[in-house]
Amino acid sequence: MGVEKKFGKPFGNLNSMKTNFFDDNDGMLEMADGMAKVLSEQPVRKTCKICGSVLDKPLFYSHGLGYIECGSCGHLNSEFEDTDVFASKVYVEDDYSKNYSAQDRAGYEKRLQSIYVPKAEFLQDCLQKENAGKIKILDIGAGCGYFVAAARKLGMDADGIELSQNQVDYGNAMAGEEILTHVGLTGSIDYIRQTDANVISAIGVLEHLIHLDENLDAVRGNQNIRYLYASVPMFSFSTAFEAANQHCYNRHTGGTHTHLFSNESVARMAEKIGFEVAYEWRFGSDINDLYRFLRVSIAKNGNPEFASYFSEKFVPLMDKLQLVLDESEFSSELHFILRRK
């Protein structure tokens, strides 16, 4: 069976929910630079995060870090290892959740409906095509519980596990029920091994897992799990846009993104655990990143009024421009569903 592919998703009001990326560029960049400093203090990465092949020299440098394209699977690896020390610093001590939590219930619901319900609908629609029957989801790295809440809103059975106690408390409070459970740095592994869920979801999570191989091994070993639904950041046009704009906040190759996937590395990861890629949905934010960099740069150069004028001309074109990049299969985000063979 071939891979069923879907391309594009309107940006909608994305920028209204990411105003700090525009209004506090310097503060966000300082945060990312701080995380990059922590990463640069970790051991040098010698092998690919996905396939284990020996890595060569960096393909390029961006915001003080080198990035190495794996010659075997095309995965983009930072030159330093993500470690437990790194994870403890950027996810726990620094309370990374404060950068993503909505401030009130209305904000939570807006983000839930516009960003996460479409993701849950994609999963539900694909599994209906699979005749998968009753769906039970374990969402790993669940954050503030947006995807769990979205899945439940659509009638699916879903629970989540999360490293940050602050995000667990926030998510449960917003949901009005206990939908999230707190786990330690390696706690997800035992949950995956023992779950009776037939779907593991990992929305924007796999790139953050320090012990990625162990988590994937747990998926492979639990025969209850028939599907893995994930979204991951991709080696893409955004990577080049960030490398060209060192004075702008690098959301894609910065901060906690210590490696980026390629089409081949996703397929290689699936093969390694006895799964295959069944469905893909590509909708990146490359054009939004380019727009942000241009607008921030124009304003920094003393032309705030022209930045607004530029926005009026450019924003109406963004969905069409992004679709071109999505269809090239080199855009910044991929949602995929893996099926057990």
Image: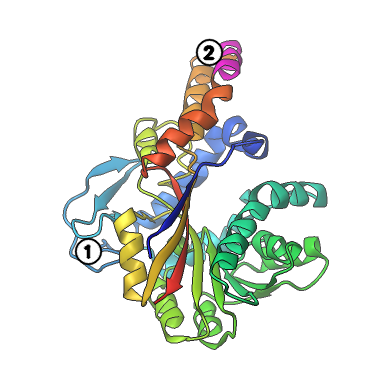
Question: Which residues lie in the magenta part?
Answer: 305-313
Which residue is nearer to you in this view: 133 or 93? Answer: 133
Residue 234 seen anywhere in this rendered image of the structure? yes
Residue 272 lies in the magenta stretch: no
How busy is the neighbourhood of tag 2: few (under 14 within 10 Å), some, or many (20 plus)? few
Q: In the rendered view of the protein, which quadrant contains the N terminus?
A: bottom left
Which residue is nearer to you in this view: 52 or 220? Answer: 220
Q: CA distance from mark 1 to mark 2?
A: 44 Å
The quadrant where residue 15 appears: top right
Location of residue 207 in the rendering, given as x and y in whole percent from the top left corner: 43, 60
Which residue is depicted at the point 36% across and 76% down? 273
How busy is the neighbourhood of tag 1: few (under 14 within 10 Å), some, or many (20 plus)? some
Scheme of image coloration: rainbow
Look at the picture and state if 67 lies above or below 273: above
Q: Which mark is residue 46?
A: 1
Which residue is nearer to you in this view: 136 or 212? Answer: 136
Callout 1 amino acid: Lys
Location of residue 323 in the rendering, given as x and y in whole percent from the top left corner: 47, 36
Callout 2 amino acid: Gly
